[in-house]
Image (spheres, rainbow, N blue to C red):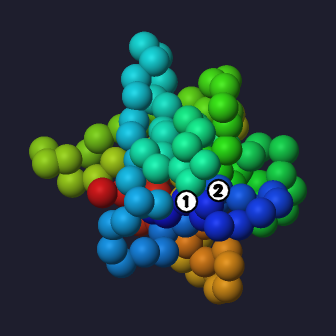
Amino acid sequence: MSAEFGWTGSGAGMLRARSQTVGPWETFGMCWDGAYYLITPLYEPSGRELYVATEKDYKSNDYGMLRARSEAIGTWEQYTITWYGSGPDYISIKARANDRYVTTERQWTGDRFGMLRARSTSVGPWEQFK
């Protein structure tokens, strides 16, 4: 996944599955706060420490968008990570903000292609991450 740090407005910091290589915008850390995971980009152009948030107040196709934009931790920045398989083979990410699994929007085109959104009630192929 990549964080769109070059964008402005309501899409700034949007997470998307769009890159074939790992660069600074594709490096993230996960921290355990004792109950939930926090996801943080390891690089942010201005040097701020940010957390990934679930935009549960966004409407329509942007509902549940994941964005690297928060400087504080609340329920919108907390996630449950579940490992599947022995490797693990993949993980699922569930947002505490709306109790939905994170999905990769692979069917979309343009600047929303591959957007990560917490919108699914079950884990299928689009909710599996390596």
Q: Secondary structure at mark 2?
A: loop
Q: Nearer the viewer, residue 73 or 80?
A: 73
Q: Residues within 10 Å of mark 1 (few under 14, many from 20)?
A: many
* Residue type for callout 1: Ala
Q: Is residue 5 above or below residue 39?
A: below
Residue sitting at 48 percent across and 39 percent down?
Answer: 39
Asked where in the image residue 63 lies, by quadrant, the reply is: bottom right
| Residue, disc 1 | 3
Q: Is residue 49 above or below residue 127?
A: above
In space, the residues marked 1 and 2 are separated at their CA atoms by 5 Å
Closer to the chain start, of discs 1 and 2, is: 1
Contact, mark 1 vs mark 2 (Cβ under 8 Å) = yes
Q: Nearer the viewer, residue 106 or 27?
A: 27
Circle number at residue 107: none
Going by the picture, which residue comes out furthest to the bottom? Answer: 109
* Residue type for callout 2: Gly
Asked where in the image residue 53 lies, by quadrant, the reply is: top right
Q: Is residue 44 above or below residue 53?
A: below
| Residue, disc 2 | 13
Asked where in the image residue 60 lies, by quadrant, the reply is: bottom right
Residue sitting at 82 percent across and 60 percent down?
Answer: 9
Residue 5 position, x and y percent, is: 62, 61
Q: How many marks?
A: 2
Residue 104 position, x and y percent, is: 53, 65
From the image, which quarter does the N terminus lie in?
Answer: bottom left
Going by the picture, which residue comes out furthest to the front? Answer: 46
Q: Residues within 10 Å of mark 2 (few under 14, many from 20)?
A: many
Residue sitting at 81 percent across and 58 percent down?
Answer: 10
Q: Is residue 6 left or right of residue 35?
A: right
Is residue 50 in view from this perspective?
Answer: yes
Q: Secondary structure at mark 1?
A: strand
Residue 127 position, x and y percent, is: 46, 57
